[in-house]
Amino acid sequence: MNTSNKHKILNDPIYGFISIFDSLIFDLLEDPHFQRLRRISQMGLSYLVYPGAHHTRFHHALGCMHLMTRAVDVLRMKGVEISDQERQGLQIAILLHDIGHGPFSHAMEQSIVEGIHHEQLSLLFMESLNKKHNGALDLAIAIFSGNYPRKFFNQLIASQLDIDRLDYLKRDSFYTGVAEGSINSQRMISMLHVQNDTLVIEEKGIYSVEKFLVARRLMYWQVYLHKTSFAAEGVIIRVLNRAKELAQTGVQLPCSDALNYFLNHKIGLHNFDENTLNLFSQLDDYDIISALKEWQSHSDFVLSSLSKMIINRQLPKIKIQTEPPEESKLLAKKQAIMKSSGLTSHEASYFVFDGTMENIAYDKNKPPIFILSKSKKMTDVIDASDQLNLHALSKPVQKYFVCYPKGIL
């Protein structure tokens, strides 16, 4: 495949100018599969709460690649041997780590595709791109999959202090305006080192790690699990589930060809072939929004009502509580809707639903963030820190929610 050796400079609002010197990376950026990320929101429907949160997966992927380049440069400067091929593999792996995200990201994974995580789809996209580039992505795929013998490479891609988190916390904080999430990603990268093939943070960077964990906890409660955006995501999942339910009973729904395919077929990892991947690559946020606009006037009451909730931001009421909701109260709300709107119990369940949300800033059951002392001793940040709050941050906090319409439908 022909490649073009071009030097590209991109201006990022977070880091300033990002330079692209590698011709393979430039060609990956130009590929339609990657360009699709310009049309996939980084934060789903969070813009319904934070009007500035319109940044995309494209922004995030470029930011991650920039931080990975900085991380490799820092580690090389400290004597960690990383070849030019390995450097390129790391850059490509992080650039493409989110390429499998669908429209509105996690909502897609719970509706029109079944049991497929976006990381699995990212791997399928990477393998497809690898065929186009005659195996040039072999190393990147091995790193992304955790199959490369140097363990710390994969830790840069996916761990409790990885490049992905260092970018999205800072980026999401910037675009939402939530200052509590702002972290010093550059400082933490400058403190990176490798000990016993494990990624570590030098001791003098411990306060930046503490700030990172606190910021992560606050961003989850204040942004990612904000009750209004959480309710909106619940509604859009149910819109797509209702559309799929109708489509598979023979109802024709106005929507794009790609979306129509996924509504009319049960798609899981077992039948996600090359043709399905190509159709999935045509889906973006615009397919869903366009469909919702059409479905507002559909004869199916459930589909039209749920679509209007998103388009007009007339979202259901959501109550957060520390105890599970009483079944009798949920049943009473369903019955009230059934009586007022003439719905069946199944149809009413689209409007009254409950579930749980969980926040854990630091998971003790996963490989820890290690702090490296001057004597080269590796210590879990929880034990190395004198910040007592970190122990609290390692305990999962679970809350329960109930969603239901604010008034009579």
Image (cartoon, rainbow, N blue to C red):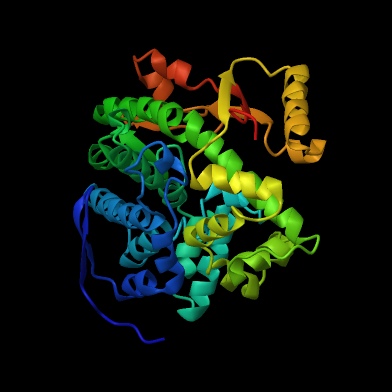
- The residue positioned 70% from the left and 54% from the top of the image is 299
Let me know if residue 378 appears in the view.
Answer: no
Quarter of the picture holding the C terminus: top right
In the foreground, 21 or 197: 21
- The residue positioned 29% from the left and 49% from the top of the image is 71
Q: Is residue 127 left or right of residue 153?
A: right
In the foreground, 94 or 234: 234
Q: Is residue 245 left or right of residue 373?
A: right
Which quadrant of the view contains residue 334?
A: top right
Let me know if residue 179 appears in the view.
Answer: yes
Number of numbered discs on residues? 0
**Compared to 134, does 75 lie above or below?**
above
Image spot of residue 335 (x, y percent) = 78, 27
Q: Is residue 83 left or right of residue 338?
A: left
Quarter of the picture holding the N terminus: bottom left
In the foreground, 298 or 212: 298
- The residue positioned 52% from the left and 45% from the top of the image is 310
Image spot of residue 283 (x, y percent) = 53, 64
Image spot of residue 379 (x, y percent) = 40, 26
**Compared to 354, does 43 lie above or below?**
below
In the foreground, 277 or 44: 44
Which quadrant of the view contains residue 62?
A: bottom left
Image spot of residue 148 (x, y percent) = 50, 58
